[in-house]
Amino acid sequence: MATKKTSSDKTGSASGSQEKKGKKKPGFLSEASENIEAGARLIGKKASKLASELADTAGKIKKEVKGLESEALVTARGKIDEFSDKAQEYLDRYKHRSEINRLAKERDVMIKVLGQLVYLKLKSRSANKENLADNEEVKNLVKNIKKKDREIINAGKESEK
């Protein structure tokens, strides 16, 4: 005769399969956990080694960059000094020319004013050629023009030094 399986048999077999599965799960998780830990240790060691190598390399690069930076600063400072000296040389050489040009422009303005004054006096017949030299305005303008001429000559002599 066939025996009937009771509910205890069913649960017994069910709990038996759970035990088998339960034993596999903790074993699997334990093994996976150990593998993960081993991998993490290995990665940690590799990361530590790589970080150390990276720090060494960064230190070497920093030293090289500082050396290049220092060299670049020395070179740049030398060029700046060279350009500054050359600029000052040109300024010294040509400042007298600039001064002469400024004085010449001032003198030219006075000559134009003198010419207009003489023209207007002659046109209005308030003066003639003979008494124009006695006119105070004309005398002052001629005197100032001569003074500018002397200043131009002095600036020219300075530029020749």
Image (cartoon, rainbow, N blue to C red):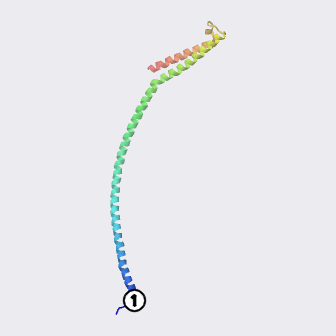
Residue 59 location (% of width, % of height): 35, 50
Left or right: 120, with 83 as reference point: right
Q: Residue at x 54, y 17 (%)?
A: 148
Q: Where does the C terminus fall, quadrant-wise? A: top left
Q: Where does the N terminus fall, quadrant-wise? A: bottom left
Q: Residue furthest top?
A: 130
Q: Which residue is mark 1?
A: 6
Q: Quadrant of residue 69?
A: top left
93, 24: nearer the viewer: 24
Please determine whether, in this image, residue 42 is positioned above or below residue 58.
below
Residue 38 location (% of width, % of height): 33, 66
Q: Quadrant of residue 116?
A: top right
Amino acid type at mark 1? Thr
Q: Residue at x 44, y 29 (%)?
A: 87
Q: Residue at x 34, y 69 (%)?
A: 34
Q: Residue furthest front?
A: 1
Q: Residue furthest bottom?
A: 1
Q: Residue at x 41, y 33 (%)?
A: 81
The local secondary structure at tag 1 comes to loop
Please determine whether, in this image, residue 41 is positioned above or below residue 72.
below
Residue 14 location (% of width, % of height): 38, 82
Residue 140 location (% of width, % of height): 60, 14
Structural crowding at the residue carrying mark 1, measured as other residues with C-alpha within 10 Å and reported as few (<14), some (14–19) or many (≥20):
few
Please determine whether, in this image, residue 18 is positioned above or below residue 1.
above
